[in-house]
Amino acid sequence: MFQPLKESELILNSDGSVYHLNLLPQDIGSTIITVGDPERVSKVSKYFDSIDLKKGKREFHCHTGTYKGHRISVLSTGIGTDNIDIVFNELDALVNIDLTTRTEKVEKQSLKIIRIGTSGCFVPSIPVDGILLSNHGLGLEGLLNFYSYPKSEKQQNFLEALLEQTDLSAVGIEPYLFPASELLLNHFKDSSVYEGLTTTCAGFYAPQGRQLRLQPKMASILDTLQGVNIPNYNLTNFEMETAGIYGLAALLGHHALSVNVLIANRAKQTFSSDPAKAVDRAIQWVLDKLVTL
C-alpha cells in the first residue's frame, strides 16, 4: 500500500535508530514530556520511580521510566520550532513507520505529548511564576507554512481578523494557528492555573520586541499583540515552540499540550526571583496530572 521511503528522506543510524534523536521504537513511552533544556530532562526523571533508558545525542536527550505505574519518556528538544520539526517528525516515525521496511504503518498510534517550558507573559494581571495552559498556538515563525494542509473556517477567520488588526503582514509575517488537544487541555484544566493563546516567535530578542544593540524592525510587537481583540481568543504570552508543536501534532494525529511557566511579565517588566523553583513546581504538577489521564 505504501511505498518505501528513500534513505535520503528517512535517515537512520547504523543501529536502526532515527537519525537525530538516536532512538528506537521501544525506547519511548506513549506519553512524552518535552523540555527545551537538556539539563531539565533529569529534573523531570528524578521523580520517576525507575529509569529504564538514558540516551543523548546533540541537544536531544531522552530518559524513559515509570512514574506511579505509568511509562513516561522525557525528551529535550532544544530551542525553537526548527528543532520541533525534527523532534515531532522523528517521534512520529518511531511509532507510525516500520523502520525495517521504511514503510508507513496502516494502523497509526497517537502519542500524548506535553511540553513543559518557560514563557514570558504580556498580560499585567497574570503573575510571574504562574502556570498557563496554551489553548492555541499562534505561529509567527513560519514552520507550518512549509507544510500543506487545509485551514479550518475557525483558523481562517482568526487569521484574517489578526491581520486586519495588526501590521504583521507588512514585515513579511504569515501567521498560522493551531489548537491544543482537547483531550489534554480538558484534563489539565485546573483552578490553580491560567489559560490563554500562546504566540510562538522565531527568536528571543527582536522577534519578541527586545532590543539590546540592534533595533527591532517591529519594536511595537508587544503593544500590537496586547491590542488584538478577537472574540473567544485571549492572547497572553510569548515563547518559541508551542505553535509548531500544535501544528505538527495535529497534522500527524498526536495529542499535544503546552504547559508554560511564566517566568517573566513583559507588561510589568518583572522576572521570577526563582525560576528553577517555579519550573520544578510545574514538573511535579504535570506528573501528578498525567497519572490520572
Image (cartoon, grey):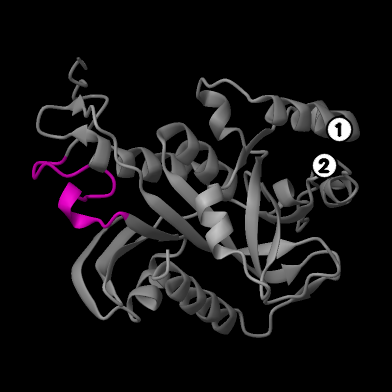
Q: Amino acid type of disc 2?
A: Met
Q: Secondary structure at mark 1?
A: loop
Q: Secondary structure at mark 2?
A: loop
Q: 98 left or right of 149?
A: left
**Mark number displayed over residue 218:** 2
The picture places residue 288, in percent across and down from the top left corner, at: 44, 76
Q: Position of residue 278 (x, y in %)?
A: 59, 80
Picture quadrant of residue 253? top left
Q: Is residue 226 above or below residue 48?
A: above
Q: Is residue 19 visible?
A: no
Work out which quarter of the rendered image holds the C terminus and state it.
bottom left
Q: Is residue 219 left or right of residue 108?
A: right
Compared with 276, 178 (above or below) is above
Name the foreground residue: 18 vs 257: 257
Q: Earlier in the sequence, mark 1 or mark 2?
A: 1
Q: Quadrant of residue 92?
A: top left
Majority SS type along the magenta span: loop
Nearer to us of marks 1 and 2 is: 1
Q: Residues within 10 Å of mark 2 (few under 14, many from 20)?
A: some
Q: Residue placed at 21% from the left, 17% from the top?
A: 2
Query: Residue 108 occupies which quadrant of the picture?
Result: top left
Real-space Cα distance between discs 1 and 2?
9 Å
Label 1 crowd bin: few (<14), some (14–19), many (20+), radius 10 Å: some
Contact? badges 1 and 2 (CB < 8 Å): yes
The residue range painted magenta reads 13-30
Which amino acid, by three-letter code, is at mark 1?
Asp
Residue 79 visible: yes
Say above or below: 194 vs 178. below
Q: Which residue is mark 1?
A: 167
Left or right, 41 with respect to 82, comes to: left
